[in-house]
Amino acid sequence: MQERYITCILCPQGCNLKVQIDDGKIVSVKNNGCEKGPGYANDEVFHPTRVLTTTVRIRKAKLPLLPVRTQKPIPKGKIFEAMKVLAGIEVEAPVTVGQVIYSNILNTGVDVIATRNMN
Amino acid sequence: MIGGGPAGLGAAVEAKKLGIDDVLILERDRELGGILNQCIHNGFGLQEFNEELTGPEYADRFIKQVKELGIEYKLDTMVLDITPDRKITAVNSHDGLIEIEAGAVILAMGCRERPRGAINIPGSRPAGIFTAGTAQRFANMEGYLPGKEVVILGSGDIGLIMARRFTLEGAKVKAVCEIMPYSSGLKRNIVQCLDDFGIPLLLRHTVVRIHGKDRVEGVTIAEVDDKKEPIPGTEKYIPCDTLLLSVGLIPENELSKKAGVILDKNTGGAYVWDDRETTTPGIFACGNVLQVHDLVDNVTDESRIAAQGAVRFLKEGEKTEPQPININPGDGVRYVVPQRVKKSRVEGAFKMFLRVTDVYENAKLVVDSDKGRLFAINKRRLSPGEMEYINVTQRLLNRFPDIREITIKVERG
Ligand SMILES: Cc1cc2nc3c(=O)[nH]c(=O)nc-3n(C[C@H](O)[C@H](O)[C@H](O)COP(=O)(O)OP(=O)(O)OC[C@H]3O[C@@H](n4cnc5c(N)ncnc54)[C@H](O)[C@@H]3O)c2cc1C
Ligand code: SF4
């Protein structure tokens, strides 16, 4: 039996989850403030993911950068690789919030979308 | 609305929805949205929209409503003066000097970062020292990463967020030094911005010297004792080209003072009633200009309260409250907003926002009055970095007819 503490990052509450792992399985999660805690603990132990937020270069806009994010969380281990891919991207204004800037990044099935309008 | 960040936007939308036709937002920047435009990370809007948005997306939801409702706004417009009888002077390159007589004013100017001067680090004054928010604007909007090897002083949320941002962009963040024994940032930010990347958070540490002549070449850090004095012999040199300061935010209240608004020294913001009316009748305040919020959702919440108060003022004019209640911070509580309540006007309930002075485990927040204890709430953990909210219902208040004072304190154990 292994015991781990994991801070849930799904909301600002930041519950300090007490997770017990036995034989490669989570057997109990405690201290969760809501029902989302156990699911987060499972993800974090077996396949941690994060939403990536960053910028890509944009032409013909007031600013040189367009903020973007992955529409859903992607595997944590792929964050730096995804940064590299996005560093090579340049888009052109106009762009609207929610527009797909790069689809299926690193074959994760997740799109990268614009997070603001840029004219 | 003075300021077009989330506070000004939320208040404008609410006032318009409550039937006020003539709503105007004055914003000094080239666009609406305030500080949210540079906060490209996610973590906004869980309460308000039940989804996790980035700052610009959150702002966009309100900007859309402002446009749909036909609310007027002026950009690149700096408000210079507000008088106690609500005459506003502003300037922009388009209209020149503008004078506006407002029926009600909502202050929503946000806050600014504490500059380096305020924390007095000895050493030279080389290039490469930035406040975290300035670095954030450079990195996320202007397209310029201000350094390659970074030390961050202060563990406020902006510093934490910028530690991750620099790391993702290929810079090396060597340490985050926090003089207090706890971080003032949200726990989730410590996890996803520092722990995820193995960036050390050095509690009870500060920067005692900055090295370098033209550009920062390194900093000396040291451990501090209980009085926050550096402990001799604990000094350590860290080479770096950039020092980021994330040492706190101060509400931006120069204008408020001109309007005769009295400030609370504990919050740095106006002293307000529960409807967010300041000590100057007809002038209201909400958002970071009133108290530094961790979460934009609470800013929006507060902006609605202020707008409702302002709309009532427009409809009913100035009224003296027959049953005022003062709210006081007691032991272990740094501040409470609002500082007083118009008891005769409370509908349903009112909400108190507060911050504690220290970290407490398994403690109680106790709400006392001059007529007896109102209630107490058990708290697993209280931290100065995380704002607490308490609702007080009208029903409860009615049980204590002559109540004049409320005090909130922390009780251990
Ligand atoms: C770096 C950072 C990270 C954050 N992260 C999160 C997070 O993850 N989740 C979350 O929920 N919240 C977060 N917050 C908190 C939240 O974003 C803020 O509390 C909120 O944006 C404050 O809104 P505001 O409208 O009061 O102030 P602001 O957004 O600062 O807006 C004030 C506006 O007033 C204008 N103004 C000021 N003076 C004048 C004048 N004289 N004339 C005309 N205009 C004027 C300014 O230009 C500005 O646009 C973060 C804040 C910061 C700074
Ligand atoms: S367990 Fe629920 S309440 Fe606690 S941090 Fe996670 S999402 Fe928030």
Image: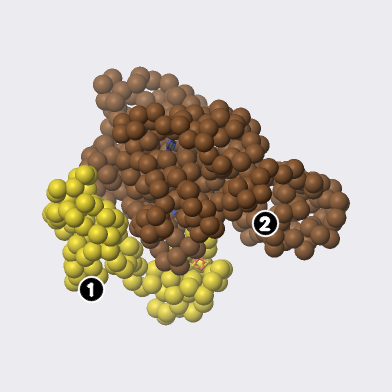
Chain colours: A yellow, B brown
Which chain does the residue under circle 1 lie in? A
Toward the viewer: B126 or B37?
B37
**Badge 2 density bin: few <14, some 14–19, many ≥20, Cα 10 Å:** some
Q: Secondary structure at mark 1?
A: loop
Residue B166 seen in the figure: yes
Left or right, residue B354 beside residue B245 = right
What chain is tagged by disc 2? B
| Residue A74 in the figure: left or right of residue B201 | left
Residue that carries the numbered disc 1 in the rendered image: A109
* Residue B78 % position (x, y): 40, 33
Q: Residue at x 84, y 48 (%)?
A: B370
Q: Given the image, on which type of amino acid does mark 2 rest?
A: Phe
**The image quadrant in which ligand 1 is located:** top left
Which residue corresponds to mark 2?
A: B350
Task: Identify the residue at image location x=37%, y=36%.
Answer: B77
Quarter in which the C terminus of chain B is drawn: bottom right
**Residue A105 seen by the camera:** no
Report the amino acid beneath label 1: Gly
